[in-house]
């Protein structure tokens, strides 16, 4: 046979291999198509690019093309017959030992995309070459890309790249998520942590600084628990990041459970069981129970919920803008909602007195000056807080009002706030002087 016939046979064989590879890949769900460079480029935040010069590039890392991604499959077997003549001419050059010019490639991570030389790469793979000479331009990206990735995985990597770009965390710091949209939720978590740090430090905190703090104080410890408990073994399709977000959902359910009647600190066990039940109803997996048990006693859990409630309360009432010296820290989940209801009732009374609508800001300031602060002053005068270590003046404000209401309901006695405060401090029955249960 002539060299042309040999080259023609090589093309037909390669074309048949591409067909059967497509059939096999349909059964195994493995990616078969070349990656379109422009699609990948649009998904990745590019940190810069530079020319690497002439290099020997492993052919199995060339998995995409700038313009011919429909003509070849992932291993550069020809998928279209219109490439036949050009493919054969390149193949003939191999038979005739003609030295072909280097191809031109663009590198992103560990992936290479053909800018010029698709047929040369295809023929070289068919001749089982391991390397090919190439002029390489590298585009620097913040995440690793591997030849095995399909387009769905690239979409997840894109989300990770955006996350890393905004947080400036190291690429290996965060466990990769297997569910779309998760990194966007993590960014929301960091935004909240940024606010917490600003409140604690009383100055503005940058987003990267907040991300570093969130990583070391919230994310990393929780992921360590997940690793220690071996919970990931029960979830082969999920990552530690996905499980971390399950736990945040548990925190939300815990918050709801307190709001639905668990404001009494003694009801903590019942509230936790209720929250766990809701999580297991939504995510019916056996290991969810283990996951919840692993964090029930974590120090940051209740604090996280309380800080979120405080942030919401302050945003809605603008209390700190009106009274910068105000201190309304709570130790029991759900109580900020009660404070907000008090302000709403006070606003209604003001409106009734004035026969006009009262702005929320004005009602908040009036409530703080005329109701909250006088009772806090009473708490301070009687040193009641000493009887309740670990609690706050805001806690006692609500408990004294609740005590006054309970005495009225149970004994039909109208007692002053001072008397209610003393009864709360002493734990005494107002009639018999016995300790209240």
Image (spheres, helix red, strand yellow):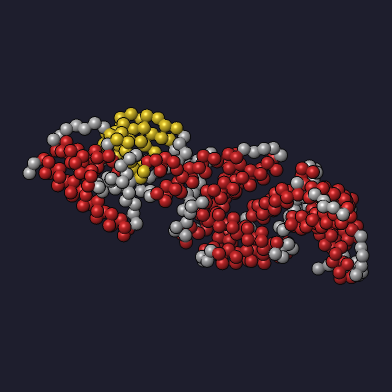
- Identity of the residue drawn at 50% across and 59% down: 231
Viewer-proximal residue among 82 and 217: 82
- Identity of the residue drawn at 84% across and 60% down: 401
Give the percent coordinates (x, y) of residue 264: 74, 63
Question: Quarter of the image holding residue 420?
Answer: bottom right
User: The N terminus is located in which quarter?
Assistant: top left
Viewer-proximal residue among 290 and 203: 203
Residue 241 lies left or right of residue 325; in this view the side is left
Give the percent coordinates (x, y) of residue 431: 92, 69
Residue 206 lies left or right of residue 350; in this view the side is left
User: The C terminus is located in which quarter?
Assistant: bottom right
Residue 336 vs 83, above or below: the answer is: below
Question: Quarter of the image holding residue 415?
Answer: bottom right
Q: How many marks?
A: 0
Viewer-proximal residue among 219 and 46: 46
- Identity of the residue drawn at 23% across and 44% down: 82
Give the percent coordinates (x, y) of residue 44: 45, 41
Question: Quarter of the image holding residue 8?
Answer: top left
Is residue 325 visible to us here? yes
Residue 403 vs 167, above or below: the answer is: below
Furthest toward the front, the residue is 356
- Identity of the residue drawn at 42% across and 47% down: 154
């Amino acid at each position: 046979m002539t060299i042309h016939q040999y080259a023609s046979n090589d093309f037909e064989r390669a074309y048949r291999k591409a067909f059967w590879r497509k059939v096999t890949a349909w059964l195994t769900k493995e990616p078969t198509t070349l990656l379109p460079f422009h699609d990948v480029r649009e998904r990745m935040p590019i940190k810069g690019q530079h020319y690497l010069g002439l290099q020997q590039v492993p052919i199995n890392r060339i998995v995409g093309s700038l313009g011919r991604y429909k003509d070849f499959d992932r291993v550069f077997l020809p998928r279209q017959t219109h490439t036949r003549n050009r493919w054969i001419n390149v193949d003939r050059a191999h038979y005739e030992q003609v030295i072909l010019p280097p191809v031109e490639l663009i590198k992103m991570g560990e992936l290479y995309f053909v800018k010029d030389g698709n047929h040369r790469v295809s023929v070289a793979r068919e001749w089982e070459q391991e390397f090919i000479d190439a002029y390489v331009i590298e585009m620097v990206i913040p995440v690793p890309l591997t030849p095995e990735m399909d387009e769905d995985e690239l979409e997840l990597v894109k989300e990770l790249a955006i996350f890393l770009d905004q947080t400036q965390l190291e690429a290996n710091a965060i466990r990769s998520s297997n569910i779309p949209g998760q990194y966007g939720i993590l960014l929301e978590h960091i935004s909240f942590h940024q606010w917490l740090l600003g409140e604690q430090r009383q100055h503005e905190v940058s987003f990267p600084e907040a991300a570093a703090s969130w990583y070391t104080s919230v994310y990393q410890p929780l992921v360590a628990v997940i690793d220690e408990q071996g919970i990931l073994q029960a979830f082969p399709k999920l990552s530690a990041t996905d499980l971390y977000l399950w736990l945040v959902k548990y925190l939300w359910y815990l918050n709801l459970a307190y709001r639905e009647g668990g404001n009494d600190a003694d009801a903590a066990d019942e509230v936790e069981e209720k929250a766990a039940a809701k999580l297991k109803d939504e995510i019916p997996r056996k290991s969810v129970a283990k996951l919840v048990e692993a964090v029930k006693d974590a120090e940051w859990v209740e604090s996280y919920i309380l800080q979120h409630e405080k942030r919401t309360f302050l945003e809605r009432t603008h209390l700190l803008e009106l009274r910068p010296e105000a201190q309304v820290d709570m130790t029991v989940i759900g109580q900020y909602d009660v404070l907000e209801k008090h302000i709403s009732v006070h606003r209604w009374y003001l409106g009734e007195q004035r026969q006009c609508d009262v702005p929320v800001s004005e009602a908040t300031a009036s409530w703080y000056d005329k109701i909250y602060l006088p009772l806090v002053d009473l708490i301070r005068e009687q040193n009641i807080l000493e009887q309740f270590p670990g609690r706050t003046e805001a806690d006692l404000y609500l408990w004294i009002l609740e005590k006054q209401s309970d005495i009225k309901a149970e004994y039909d006695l109208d007692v002053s706030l001072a008397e209610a405060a003393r009864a709360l401090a002493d734990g005494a029955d107002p009639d018999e002087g016995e300790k209240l249960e």
